Image (cartoon, helix red, strand yellow):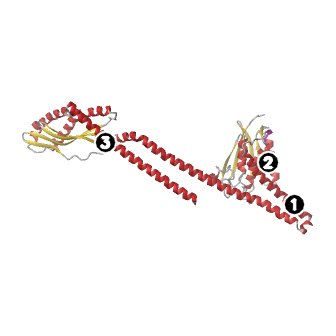
Amino acid sequence: MKRQLLFFISLAALLLFVAVQIFMIRSTWRQKEEILLMRYKSLSREGLSLLISKKKSNGFEKAMDITDKFAEYLISEELVRLRASYDTASLSRMALKETYKIMEENEKLTSFFKSYIGNEGFDNDFKTHIAISKLVLLSPYGKTVMADTTYSKPKKNMIVVNTFREEHNNFIIEFHYLIDLTHKNELVLREALLSFILILGSVLIVILVFGLTWRNLMEERRLSELKSDFINNMTHELKTPLSTITVAGRTLEKEQVLGDRDKVLETARLIGKQSVHLNQLINTILEVSFLERQEFELDRHNVVIDELLHQVVCSFLTSCDGCAKVEEEYCNNGLEIPVDIVYFTTMISNLLTNAVKYCDREPVIKVTSASSGNDLEISVADNGVGIPSEHLGHIFEKFYRVPQGNIHKTKGLGLGLYYVRRIAVAHGGDVSVTSKPGRGTTFKIKIPIQNKI
């Protein structure tokens, strides 16, 4: 319950932190955007003031002269021809189109701005626009309005540099000159990149720390549960032979049993069997403890591996009164490799024992060995209950046991397969497993071949 509460509190804190960082990113973006627009607006107006004060020009002189001649043409030719019908709509469209073209081709303000802003150390890769709000022709017959509109608020990327009003011999014009920062987002990102990297980096670090902390917490919880399961299983395993020995000892104290020689022998054999089982459990725990020490070393001897495997199988069948059918297939032709006979024997015996323990039918085990390149491959396959795929990655961990996998009364300590891997690794090799529930399990041990004869 405490872990769940801690998880939800930590998750809420993480989400709040991420939300704050997102808000900071948005605020930073807006701030940088506003600063960028203000910077270009200020620079453009400073540049225009400098142009007017020093060169006595606004950059549109040539464009206005050409427009004045164009207006004279409209008045003398087009306007007189259309006066009878009062249809000036088509003329207005044509006049505006040509006026825009004249102004865009002949204005000098844009080139000046780009040079000025570039010299100030800022990006000058921008576009400009001209928006005509009023165009009036001054003819002998009076004023003829070609355009008269109310200029709407510019788009977000547009900066209004100035509004111009020019009155010449043949026309009056009012227009707005704008800078279009279509690549504004790129500029803002360039400005705020370092801030965003720091913010995103902090978010990723916090998420990573949270994930690692939670993972370690879950691993600690899992190890704690494994430890509890091990203690419970060990208690059960030790109490069973001890209880049997205690009951058998009390049985021998009875007068009627002491007078029955067969009963005494049977009870003594039972005590002896349970004592051996108890001693095996204690030795297993001590051996695993010994394997954990860094000074653990193998006492290697060259042995004919096929003969050793056959001896292990025969010894196992004898000890379990032929509890399984074992098929053997060895293809090493007298190959000798250096192994620790005691630990190697126990490693194979553990796999054979598991094959019998975790089988819900008559056990059939196949033991094979063959050399593959520089490795010796030993395979122990059974027809048992199998192992679900989600547990395959954990079965070699100390104290780990597949839930409800043991169909026998003896639960075990969860040390057998851990022991197998430790011994295989100590020999310079490793062990792998493949399994399908209901179809059996296959363990493959690989050991490097050394001093091959």
Within-10-Å neighbours for mark 1: few <14, some 14–19, many 20+: some
Q: Which badge, 2 or 1, comes first in the chain's sequence?
A: 1
Mark 1 element type: helix
Instruction: Please name the residue that numbered disc 3 is placed on.
Output: 38
Q: Position of residue 175 (x, y in %)?
A: 20, 41
Q: In the depicted view, which residue is nearer to us: 420 or 17?
A: 17
Please identify the quadrant where the N terminus is shown.
Answer: bottom right
The alpha-carbon separation of the residues under discs 2 and 1 comes to 28 Å
Seen at 12% across and 38% down, the residue is 78
Specify the farthest residue to the left.
140
- Residue 43: quarter of image: top left
Please identify the quadrant where the C terminus is shown.
Answer: top right
What segment carries the magenta color? 301-305
Mark 2 element type: helix
The alpha-carbon separation of the residues under discs 3 and 2 comes to 87 Å
Q: In the shown orientation, is residue 1 left or right of residue 237?
A: left
Within-10-Å neighbours for mark 3: few <14, some 14–19, many 20+: few
Instruction: Please name the residue that numbered disc 2 is placed on.
Output: 313
Asked whether 422 falls inside the magenta stretch, the response is no
Within-10-Å neighbours for mark 2: few <14, some 14–19, many 20+: many
The tag on residue 268 is 1
Q: Which badge, 3 or 2, comes first in the chain's sequence?
A: 3
Residue 107 appears in the rendering: no
